[in-house]
Image (cartoon, rainbow, N blue to C red):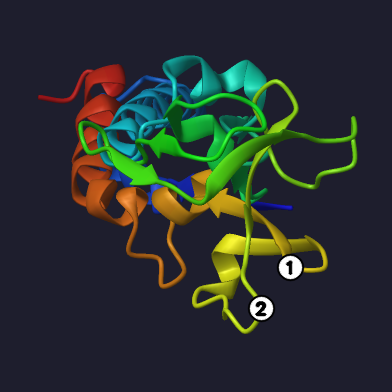
Amino acid sequence: MVARIGMTINGLENLDKIKNLKKDIPLAAVRTLNRVTERARTVGAKRIREEVAFPASYLNPAQKKLYVAKKANKGSLEAVIRASDRATSLSRFVSSGSEGKMGVTVQVSPGKSRTMRKAFLMKLRSGAASINTKHNLGLAMRLRNGEVVRNKKSFKRIKGNLYLLYGPSVDQVFIGKDRSGVAAKMEPEILDSLQQEFFRVLGID
């Protein structure tokens, strides 16, 4: 599953009223959308990493965590950026700790570390976890009898009182549950960029 945002250009018919405009307007719109969308994906990845300590390689387009899923063409003036909503293992944010040993340090927010004394890294069966892991390791915690999981969205029960711990997914940071994530904050600059790039391609001052 993925979450997505789309960019479109409307009202092209009104440009026919501009005298001496000989440019191919639909082609200009296609080029504008595709250039701005690629830039927005790149900037979006940078902004995400300012909030969550994902490695740069994790958000590389080839990884399909944040990528341009659809490019505009003359038949469809829409470009789409998709962000993966697959849960991210908290093991990806471990900065110190050894497999099987209690006590790890995690850094989810850049520059802010947290020690989790009861957590430990454990090997997962290949392909068994429905989360993005690092070297097939999960970060786990064994709760005491009667101990309650407070944030169930960040835990997944394996068996008994053994739980896997989650970190944020890419779409949680990029779009957000109430659509107030990085993408929403970027919207004004994206709109300005679309206008400026479109006019530049058309040669309009």
The answer to whether 92 is drawn above or below residue 190 in the figure is above
Where, by quadrant of the figure, is residue 71 drawn? top right
Where, by quadrant of the figure, is residue 111 drawn? top left
Q: Residue 8 carries which label?
A: none
Which percent across, then down, holds residue 140? 64, 48
Q: Pointer 1: residues within 10 angstroms few (<14), some, or many (20+)?
A: some
Which percent across, then down, holds residue 31? 46, 21
Where, by quadrant of the figure, is residue 195 drawn? top left
Which percent across, then down, holds residue 21? 29, 25
Horizontal side, residue 129 vs residue 49: left or right: right
Q: Which of marks 2 and 1 is nearer the N terminus?
A: 2
Horizontal side, residue 122 vs residue 173: left or right: right
Tell which tag, 2 or 1, sits nearer the viewer.
2
- Residue type for callout 2: Asn
The answer to whether 103 is drawn above or below residue 154 in the figure is above
Q: Nearer the viewer, residue 50 or 189?
A: 50
Say which residue label 2 marks: 145
Label 2 with label 1: CB-CB less than 8 Å = yes
